[in-house]
Image: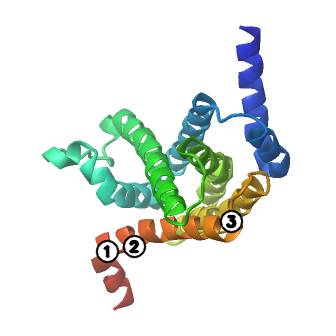
Amino acid sequence: MKSSDEGMGGLLKNYFRMIYRPSEVVEDLTSKPVNLSQTFIVIVISSVLLISGVFITGGSLYTTFHEYAYSYPLEILTSGQVIGFYLPYGNVNYYGLVFLTDFIFCIKAWLFLSVLFFVFLRVFKQQISIKRTAQIIAWSIFSFAIIMFGASLVCLGLSYILPAIYHFIYFGVLAAVFIGIAPVIIYQFLERLKDVSVYNVIRSYYLSLFIVFVIFTINHANKFLNLIW
């Protein structure tokens, strides 16, 4: 029991230290075999933080988040939508089910991006295991859900000042995590892993994001065209 408590305490300590001392956390993670159960706990904590922030802020942030999440092909093909059930996320009577669905969506997003990243790593002949890949994605992206939670609270205040655009600020921060922060953390992982090419791994990550973005863009092509025209 004591070792279990110490393990959980160490995990939570690393989770919060990732914000201000990421190099120390990465060094600690790479010095040990991958612990998938702890990696999954990171996803659970991050998912709850991310979704809670969206629910607390509400408004156009809540609506836009669910509009894009629930219309993503991966979500459509792996949810009740495939049999014609569409969850009315705007109905307060379904908020509990919406929260659970969002939570599962975050887990699916982690798995999808991890597998996609792993496939590109194999294409470029990088010998990083699927377990390590899942760990890297979890700690490089999802552990920054605490930043997104903070961004949600900021957007809650901005919703009274900039009601038409505050949700764009939130998604701008989210994009910064994916495009700017995550690659830095991935690079720190690579510094401590042997026989890997930094160029090929970073290229694999950005190609994974590109595939996700292409699917998203194709799925929402009409909306983008309407914004342009």
Q: Residue at x 75, y 14 (%)?
A: 3
The amino acid type of the residue labelled 3 equals: Ser
Q: Which residue is mark 1?
A: 218
Quadrant of the image for the N terminus? top right
The amino acid type of the residue labelled 1 equals: Ile
Q: Kindly report which numbered mark, 1 or 3, lies closer to the viewer in this rendering.
A: 3
The 10 Å Cα crowd at callout 3, few under 14, some 14 to 19, many 20 or more, is: some
Total number of numbered discs in the rendering: 3
* Helix, strand or loop under label 2: helix
Q: Is residue 95 above or below residue 143?
A: above
Q: Earlier in the sequence, mark 2 or mark 3?
A: 3
Q: Residue at x 68, y 52 (%)?
A: 147
Q: Residue furthest bottom?
A: 229
Q: Residue furthest left?
A: 84
Q: Which residue is mark 3?
A: 197
* Helix, strand or loop under label 3: loop
Quadrant of the image for the C terminus? bottom left
Q: CA distance from mark 1 to mark 2?
A: 6 Å
Residue 71 visible, this angle: no
Instruction: Tell me the quarter of the picture where residue 228 sits.
Output: bottom left
Q: CA distance from mark 2 to mark 3?
A: 25 Å
| Residues under numbered marks 1 and 2 in contact, where contact means CB atoms less than 8 Å apart | yes
Q: Which residue is mark 2?
A: 214
**Left or right: where does residue 157 sit relative to residue 12?**
left
Picture coordinates of residue 165, whole percent (x, y): 53, 72
